Amino acid sequence: MKSQEHLFTYCLRLADNALILGHRLSELCSKAPFIEEDLAQTNIALDMIGRSQALLNYAGQLEGKGQSADDLAYRRPEQEYYNHLLVEQPNGDFAYTLARQLYLSLFELHFYTELEKSKDSTLASIAAKTVKEIKYHLEHTSDWVIRLGDGTAESKRRMQKAIDDLWMYTGELFEMDDLEMALMSSGIAVDLIPIKSKWLNELKTVLQEATLQLPDDSYMQTGSRKGIHTEYMGHILSEMQYLQRAYPDATW
């Protein structure tokens, strides 16, 4: 029974990353630099939200309390969300949106590639679909980071600042707790330790081509696995959950 509770929480962690970033990217609808990029960011948002729906549906089944994906998305308080702090950061200017996506997509490509090997067939199936989407996310984002980093003096300055400012949220991507260690020993969860070196090497390659500098190691902010978030999370949920909170059980 404990292992099923662990798996439920693990699914929430994965789902919340996709859900919150999907919401963040949806804020860019009609606000991207030009129309094709508006569509690109919206499509990435839809990929994220679709992934979160699949994971939340599975989490609801594991919990066994009759909660739907919508219930889990719209009726949990802030302290019961477990997304990485990185994904709740504001879009900022376009450089911040790209830096956030680059850090995450590089991580997710390796993470979901490993999750395809999970002994949990549902997670493995979701991972297989997700990897195809992430490859596009990463290619699109890397191209933009290189274009702006190796562009004008102003675009380079902004891109470097975004890379530097969001660096403090990347350490959390590779944290593992007892829950994940237990699921990993059962062949379900992903070992994050070997992923970090791959992530760092590929990040260096992208930044080098973009003529940008890898930030120096410094303080890393953490806390999401304990339901601790930045100031931005409450604002996200107040907007995202408004309709369900204002009109409980409303149907279309």
Image (tube, rainbow, N blue to C red):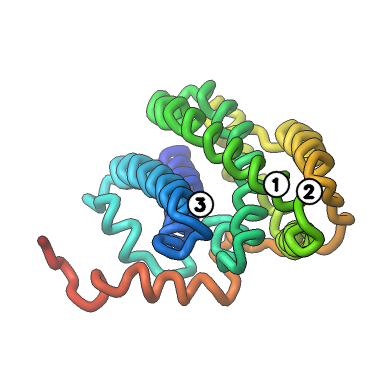
Q: Are marks 3 and 1 in contact (CB under 8 Å)?
A: no
Q: Amino acid at mark 2?
A: Asp
Q: Amino acid at mark 1?
A: Arg
Tell me if I can see residue 116 in this picture: yes
Closest to the camera, between mark 3 and mark 1, is 1
Query: Where 30 sits versus 66, above or below?
Result: below
Report the residue marked by disc 2: 150
**For the view shown, which residue lies furthest in the left direction?**
252
Q: Can you tell which quarter of the image residue 90 is in?
A: bottom right
For the residues bearing labels 2 and 1, Cβ distance under 8 angstroms: yes
Residue at horizontal 60%, vertical 34%?
A: 109
In the rendered image, residue 37, in percent from the top left (x then y), is placed at 49, 51
Check disc 2 and report its element: helix, strand or loop: loop
Quadrant, the C terminus: bottom left
Q: Nearer the viewer, residue 41 or 165?
A: 41
Where does the image place residue 118, in percent across and percent down from the top left? 51, 25
* Camera sees residue 52: no
Is label 1 in a helix, a strand or a loop?
helix
| Residue at disc 3, secondary structure | helix
User: What residue lies at 47% left-to-right and 38% top-to-bottom?
Assistant: 3
Q: Earlier in the sequence, mark 3 or mark 2?
A: 3
Q: Where residue 68 appears, x then y in whole percent? A: 25, 51
Q: Is residue 242 left or right of residue 138?
A: left
Say the numbered circle drawn on residue 17: 3
Please provide percent x and percent y for residue 87.
56, 58
Tell me the residue that label 1 is attached to: 147
Side of 53 relative to 160 (left or right): left
In the image, is residue 69 above or below residue 91? above
Give the alpha-carbon distance from disc 2 to disc 1, as whole Å.
Answer: 6 Å
